């Protein structure tokens, strides 16, 4: 009996999806590992053997936490200083690192933060680029807000690979990572960006007059209207660093970073805060790094911390090893380790109210009262416990498929953050 047309379409779609799956499994080892039956069963099972899973890039989380653990903390930013009605602004700015070709994504991001927060506050913007800004970029951006805007150029030595880096060794490291299918594995400019964000942006002349910054990237979305000023809240409550998303780093990009950080702590034990957030980053008191970090494409922080003696020595200690280029150290784990070790954990804040999306990952408030009050446009069900496989944009890419992030899903470190306050 002949199949009807709708049934033939469904069967054709299934065959096509299976063909793509087997093609990626055969040609992209990380995809094959991540979607194998053993990897998937490890994600969705509770590990009945009782043994702690070792970290691999395809089997995160490294140290799974039971979903039925202690009650979650009430992550609700308190009322008081910082809420709308307080007419004074903090000494703060938004900062965006972008290129001229990012203009459409930058427009989206600025329009989003203006709609959800800044049109009521008028905080200034600083845009940084390793090249001169085009008139077109400045024209497109300048019409989006009445707030002051500055367009700066990054000094050459802060951006480009230093002359003292052994390029043969760096190239070999990039080639190895490309063979492993690691995203941005072969990109020197990505490493330039990570090093610049780790050790230099807060020294730029356009930022030196400010204390606080809110980092924004092109192509992001803010899903909830804020009824308070995060800068003023942090100022009034003695906070230093804030985040909205915590997740795992790719271990193969930072094989020697934690050992280098431990060497720094041994050299300068006086810099380690007594009530720090080590429990967020390690399962065994600091012997190993569990790969948990704050996703730094969103961060609000006090630049005086980065400019201070402790972080300055920390960055210089890391930088002289060449790890930003010989490996692929990111500013996210570097900032996270510094904040998590050299600050009391009470000075780090999770902004639950800030619905934020940097595709494919997002944070959406799970508390219905917060979600409704913020008139949030994000889908709460995408944030809680969902694991979504997204195919690469091109089948011939060396990059494995992305995994959409969720607050308490298998690739999230939110529970590791929660537990240090339980």
Image (cartoon, rainbow, N blue to C red):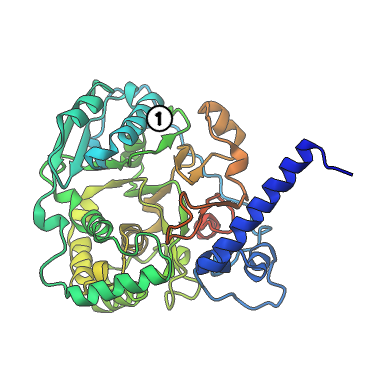
- Relative placement, left or right, of 25 versus 247 is right
Q: Pointer 1: what residue?
A: 228
Given residues 182 and 211, the one toward you in this image is 182
Location of the N terminus by quadrant is top right
Q: Position of residue 277 (x, y in %)?
A: 42, 62
Work out whether residue 347 or residue 119 is closer to the camera in this orientation and state it. Answer: 119
Horizontal and vertical percent position of residue 295? 40, 53
Is 235 located above or below residue 56 in the figure? above
The location of residue 310, given as percent across then percent down, is: 21, 63
Query: Residue 159, percent across and down?
Result: 16, 55
Residue at the limit of the structure toward the front, as seen here: 2
The answer to whether one can see residue 61 in this image is: no
Residue sitting at x 35%, y 59%? 184
Q: Secondary structure at mark 1?
A: loop
In the rendered structure, the answer to whether residue 157 lies left or right of residue 238 reads: left
Tell me where residue 113 sits by quadrant: top left
Q: Residue at x 70, y 65 (%)?
A: 45
Residue 340 in view here: yes
Residue in the image at 48% along x and 60% along y: 400
Q: Is residue 402 left or right of residue 179?
A: right
């Amino acid at each position: 009996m002949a199949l009807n047309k709708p049934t033939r379409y469904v069967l054709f779609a299934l065959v096509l999806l299976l063909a793509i799956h087997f093609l990626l499994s055969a040609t992209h080892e990380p995809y094959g590992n991540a979607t194998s039956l053993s990897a998937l069963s490890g994600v969705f099972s509770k590990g009945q053997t009782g043994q702690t899973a070792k970290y691999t890039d395809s089997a995160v989380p490294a140290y799974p936490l039971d979903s039925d653990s202690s009650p979650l903390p009430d992550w609700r930013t308190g009322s008081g200083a910082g809420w709308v009605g307080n007419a004074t602004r903090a000494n703060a700015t938004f900062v965006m690192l972008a290129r001229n070709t990012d203009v459409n994504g930058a427009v989206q991001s600025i329009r989003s933060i203006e709609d959800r927060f800044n049109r009521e506050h008028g905080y200034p913007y600083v845009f940084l680029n390793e090249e001169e800004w085009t008139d077109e970029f400045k024209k497109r951006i300048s019409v989006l807000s009445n707030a002051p805007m500055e367009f700066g150029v990054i000094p050459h030595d802060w951006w480009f690979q230093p002359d003292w880096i052994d390029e043969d060794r760096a190239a070999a490291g990039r080639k190895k990572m490309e063979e492993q299918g690691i995203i941005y594995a072969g990109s020197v400019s990505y490493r330039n960006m990570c090093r610049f964000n780790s050790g230099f942006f807060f020294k730029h002349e356009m930022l030196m007059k400010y204390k606080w910054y809110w980092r924004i990237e092109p192509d992001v979305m803010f899903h909830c209207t804020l009824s308070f000023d995060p800068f003023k809240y942090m100022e009034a409550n003695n906070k230093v660093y804030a985040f909205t998303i915590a997740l795992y780093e790719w271990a193969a990009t930072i094989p020697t970073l934690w050992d280098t950080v431990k060497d720094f702590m041994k050299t300068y034990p006086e810099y380690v805060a007594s009530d720090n957030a080590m429990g967020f980053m390690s399962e065994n008191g600091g012997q190993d790094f569990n790969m948990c970090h704050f996703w730094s494409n969103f961060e609000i922080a006090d630049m005086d911390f980065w400019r201070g003696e402790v972080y300055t020595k920390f960055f210089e200690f890391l930088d002289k090893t060449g790890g930003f280029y010989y490996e692929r150290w990111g500013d996210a784990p570097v900032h996270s380790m510094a904040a998590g070790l050299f600050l009391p954990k009470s000075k780090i804040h999770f902004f639950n109210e800030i619905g934020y999306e940097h595709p494919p990952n997002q944070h959406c408030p799970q508390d219905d009262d917060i979600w409704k009050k913020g008139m949030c446009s994000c889908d709460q069900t995408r944030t809680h416990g969902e694991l979504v496989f997204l195919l690469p944009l091109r089948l011939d890419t060396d990059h494995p498929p992305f995994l959409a992030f969720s607050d308490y899903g298998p690739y999230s470190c939110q529970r590791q953050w929660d537990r240090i306050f339980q």
